[in-house]
Image: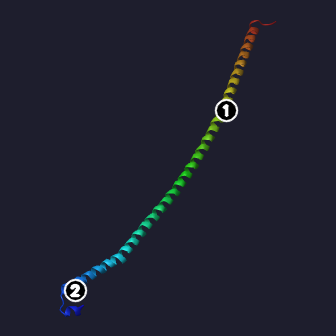
Amino acid sequence: MWAILSQGTDVGNIGGWVSAGLLGSVLAWLLHKHLPDKDKQIADLIGTFLNEINRARGDAEKLLEIERQQRRELHEQNRGDMLRMATLLSDNTRETTILAHENIAIAQEARALSASIGNLVSKVTKLDVNPVL
């Protein structure tokens, strides 16, 4: 290049070719190096993002399944507790009914004894009023 300049040719013409060469080099670098590397970088970024989304989705599904299982277990436990409470209530109701019937029977016996005692008292009173000689 110095040789061309030393011959005294027009520098403007050479400057244009040098400029076109630099521009061509930059465009070639953009086309063959920079843009494919940028595309690869963007593809890797998208791939990483999709992997993270899939991992997060998998984690969320696992957590949802754990929550569902815990809800099922709690439901079964509550159902068992309610059945036990119903059984206890039924047993208590039966015992209360039996005790109520026993109390009614005792009250009837007490009335019968009271009537018997009343009859005995009236007989004793008659005996005292009319002593037998």
Image coordinates of residue 88 in percent, x first then y, are: 64, 38
Residue beneath the point at 22% across and 91% down: 4
For this rendering, which residue is in front, 7 or 127? 7
- The amino acid sitting under disc 2 is Ile
Q: Which mark is residue 14?
A: 2
Mark in front: 2 vs 1: 2
Amino acid under disc 1: Arg
Percent x, y of residue 54: 48, 62
- The residue lying furthest to the right in this view is 133
Decide: few, some or many residues near mark 1? Use Cα within 10 Å; few <14, some 14-19, many ≥20. few
Q: Earlier in the sequence, mark 2 or mark 1?
A: 2
In this view, the residue in front, 43 or 89, is: 43
Horizontally, residue 29 falls left or right of residue 17, namely right
How has the structure been colored for display?
rainbow
Residue at the image point whose x is 70% and y is 19% from the top: 111
Left or right: where 8 falls relative to 86: left
Numbered badge on residue 94: 1
Corner quadrant of residue 92: top right
Q: Residue at x 60, y 43 (%)?
A: 79
